Image: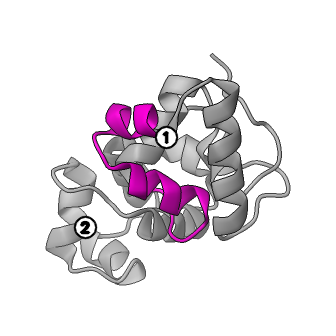
């Protein structure tokens, strides 16, 4: 993933410390430092808090687009809508839950949980799905309705 560079860039642009940002997303400064270095994966909930604070999209943080913010973007992911959209993307690409689970190196039960809106898609899985199928992370999370697809 490539969100670490964006995290650091946005933090430094506002002249904030890693402790400042750690406090914002409710983690210790050392943990936040690991997120910037990408030696630890930032959970979507915390990445979303960060995106909201800096008024940028998840797609921007993932370096999928140079568009900082989409119009009509919601502040929080919608689990139910996210599940529906994941299922839609999977079916559009003729991929079974088992095949998607194998691609992500996870279990089919995790895919079922995501599709039923029981929990949010984990950061590395979200990134991989969006990259592979050219789908906006913000769209997949239910934060926006358009664009669905990323510009190549």
Q: In this rendered view, identify the residue nearer to me: 146 or 38.
A: 146
Q: Position of residue 116 (x, y in %)?
A: 61, 63
Residue under the point 59% across and 56% down: 115
Q: Is residue 142 at all visible to an observer of this figure? A: no
Q: Position of residue 8 (x, y in %)?
A: 34, 52
| Quarter of the figure with residue 105 | top left
In the shown orientation, is residue 9 left or right of residue 87? left
Residue under the point 45% across and 62% down: 44
Q: Position of residue 84 (x, y in %)?
A: 71, 53
- The region drawn magenta spans 97-122
Q: Which residue is mark 1?
A: 97
In the shown orientation, is residue 146 left or right of residue 1? right
Q: Is residue 51 at all visible to an observer of this figure? A: yes
Disc number for residue 40: none
Give the structural element (helix, strand or loop) at label 1. Answer: helix
| Quarter of the figure with residue 147 | top right
Q: Is residue 11 above or below residue 145?
A: below
Q: In this rendered view, identify the residue nearer to me: 62 or 140.
A: 140
Residue under the point 47% across and 51% down: 111
Disc number for residue 32: 2
Whether residue 109 appears in magenta in the rendering, the answer is yes
Q: Position of residue 23 (x, y in %)?
A: 34, 83
Residue under the point 14% across and 71% down: 30
> N-terminal of the two: label 1 or label 2?
2
- What distance separates the C-alpha of mark 1 from that of mark 2? 33 Å
Name the dominant secondary structure of the magenta segment. Answer: helix
Label 2: how many residues lie within 10 Å, few (<14), some (14-19) or many (20+)?
Answer: many
Label 1: how many residues lie within 10 Å, few (<14), some (14-19) or many (20+)?
Answer: some
Whether residue 99 appears in magenta in the rendering, the answer is yes
């Amino acid at each position: 993933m490539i969100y670490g560079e964006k995290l650091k860039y946005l933090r430094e642009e506002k002249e904030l410390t890693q402790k400042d940002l750690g406090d914002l997303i409710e983690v210790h400064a050392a943990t936040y430092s690991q997120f910037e270095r990408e030696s630890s994966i930032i959970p979507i909930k915390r990445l979303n808090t960060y995106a909201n604070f800096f008024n940028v999209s998840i797609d921007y943080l993932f370096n999928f687009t140079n568009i900082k913010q989409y119009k009509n973007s919601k502040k929080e992911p919608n689990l139910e809508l996210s599940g529906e959209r994941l299922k839609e993307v999977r079916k559009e690409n003729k991929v079974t839950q088992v095949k998607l689970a194998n691609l992500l190196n996870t279990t089919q039960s995790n895919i079922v949980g995501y599709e039923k809106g029981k929990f949010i898609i984990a950061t590395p899985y979200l990134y991989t799905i969006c990259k592979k199928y050219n789908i906006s992370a913000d769209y997949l999370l239910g934060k926006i309705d358009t664009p669905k697809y990323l510009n190549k």
